[in-house]
Amino acid sequence: SHFTISDRFFLKKVEELERELEKDLVQEYLTWLDRPDVRKHLFSNGCEADLYDRERQLIIEAKANHRDDVMVAHGMGQAMYYRSLSELGPDDRIAVLVPGRPSEEVVRLLFIYDVGLIYRDGETFKEELA
């Protein structure tokens, strides 16, 4: 497939917007959680998990759009990959952080693979951890 310059520009802008939305979501969650020890985690291979909660041994990957099933599944895949990296405990749990509750199909997918779900619910966050 051939993208034009304007297609590439548009895709780059969409990616930048998604990153901004994810950053805002992470910040809102951290404010709600009120635990300064929960922060980004940089792995030795250069990959970075959006959040790592050492106390709960929980790797959290944020995604900007809970209505996009593929995007939420991508977040799940990223979190599963991070869990496979040996430097954190093998017992670490994983969760996806999204701005709202995803479709029941995605909730079922997360449940099948023991992936927790954290989502904004009004002024608060709901945590359904595996």
Image (cartoon, rainbow, N blue to C red):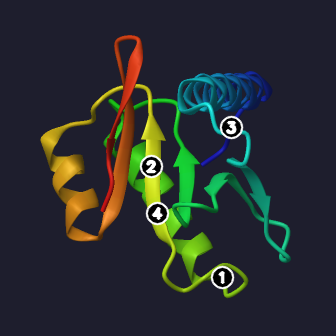
Please give the residue where the numbered disc 3 appears in the rendered image. Answer: 3
Assess disc 2: are there few (<14), some (14-19) or many (≥20) residues with their C-alpha within 10 Å of its C-alpha.
many
Mark 1 neighbour density, 10 Å: few (under 14) some (14–19) many (20 or more) = some
The location of residue 119, given as percent across then percent down, is 38, 33
Numbered disc 1: secondary structure: loop
Q: What residue type is labelled 4?
A: Ile
Image coords of residue 106 (percent x, y): 24, 49
Which residue corresponds to mark 1? 85
- Which residue occupies the foreground of this view, 29 or 21? 29
Pointers 2 and 4 in contact (C-beta within 8 Å): yes
Location of residue 25 in the rendering, given as x and y in whole percent from the top left corner: 58, 26
Instruction: Tell me where residue 43 sits by quadrant.
Output: bottom right
Where does label 2 land, which residue? Answer: 96
- Residue at 77 percent across and 25 percent down: it is 9
As measured in the structure, the alpha-carbon distance from the residue carrying label 2 to the one carrying label 4 is 7 Å
* Pointers 2 and 3 in contact (C-beta within 8 Å): no
How far apart in space, not on screen, are marks 4 and 3 (Cα)?
35 Å
Q: Earlier in the sequence, mark 2 or mark 3?
A: 3
Pick whichever of labels 1 and 4 is earlier in the sequence.
1
Q: What element carries label 2?
A: strand
- Element marked by disc 3: loop
Measured Cα–Cα span from mark 3 to mark 1: 35 Å
Foreground residue among 96 and 90: 90
Residue highlighted by disc 4: 94
N-terminal of the two: label 3 or label 1? 3
| Left or right of 110 on screen, residue 6 | right
Rendered residue at 40%/20% (across/down): 124
Where 117 sits versus 67, above or below? below
Sequence order check: which comes first, mark 2 or mark 1? Answer: 1
What amino acid is at disc 2? Val
**What's the CA distance linking mark 2 and mark 1?**
17 Å
Q: Residue at x 59, y 61 (%)?
A: 55
